[in-house]
Image (cartoon, rainbow, N blue to C red):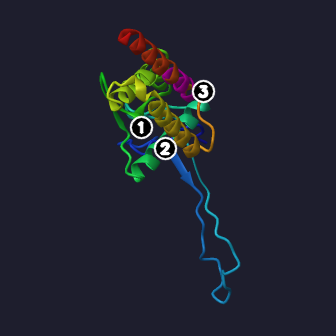
Amino acid sequence: MIENISYNPHAQSPLHVLKNFQEEKVNFSNIPENKTRDNQQDRITLYGDSDVPLTYSASMNVNSGEGAKYDMLQGLVANLLKEQGIETKVTTENGEIDISTVTPQEAKDLTGDDGYFGVDKTSDRIVKMAISIAGGDPSRIDAIKEGVDKGFQEALKAFDGKLPDISYDTYDAVMEKLDKWVSESTKAAA
């Protein structure tokens, strides 16, 4: 019996190799010709034993527990995004990231304090974009904050009213940075 092996739809090679494959043969020749099989169920049992370790391509890992669940969820989300025509590649300052292939550790690094999708860097990008859209005019702070609020509310709605903590932290950081920008701009103008 093989357990805790994740399926990778993008793999180019077989998931596993079994030796000594055995099958249970079902013989229907013993059924009399005048009897029907309509109410009978056919049963075939297949099983196998492996006396060599399972083999994997370089891009595959044996996963157990949470790792297998993560891989399954990651594959599902990536496929759903692709089916909707949403690109799974994100361009960053250091190149391109394909979110359909990110490992749990890479995801932690990307969303960590110094990560590209972490609170600080994400809030910096949002604030920079908002200031640019407002033409660098601090008197438009109310419109800027209204736009940020609207985007956050749309995200909440899209995720049934609950977002990860990092989203709330990013929202708070954006608002703080916008307030700081207005304060610094007002002092510089005085």
For the stretch drawn in magenta, the main secondary structure is helix
Query: Which stretch did the figure color magenta?
Result: 167-174
Comparing 174 with 6, the one in front is 174
Q: Which residue is mark 3?
A: 165
| Residue at which label 1 appears | 100
User: Does residue 32 appear left or right of residue 133 in this picture?
Assistant: right
Q: Earlier in the sequence, mark 1 or mark 3?
A: 1
**Image-based side of 117 in relation to 67, left or right:** left
Give me the disc on residue 187. none
Q: Which residue is rendered at x = 53% and y = 35% of the image?
A: 149
Closest to the observer, 93 or 17: 93
Which mark is drawn over residue 77? 2
- Please tell me whether residue 83 is drawn above or below residue 168 in the rendered image: below
Q: State the separation of the CA atoms marked 1 and 3.
A: 22 Å
Q: CB under 8 Å between callouts 2 and 1?
A: yes
Task: Specify few, some or many for label 1: CA neighbours under 10 Å numbering under 14, 14-19, or 20 or more.
Answer: some
Which quarter shows the N terminus?
Answer: top right
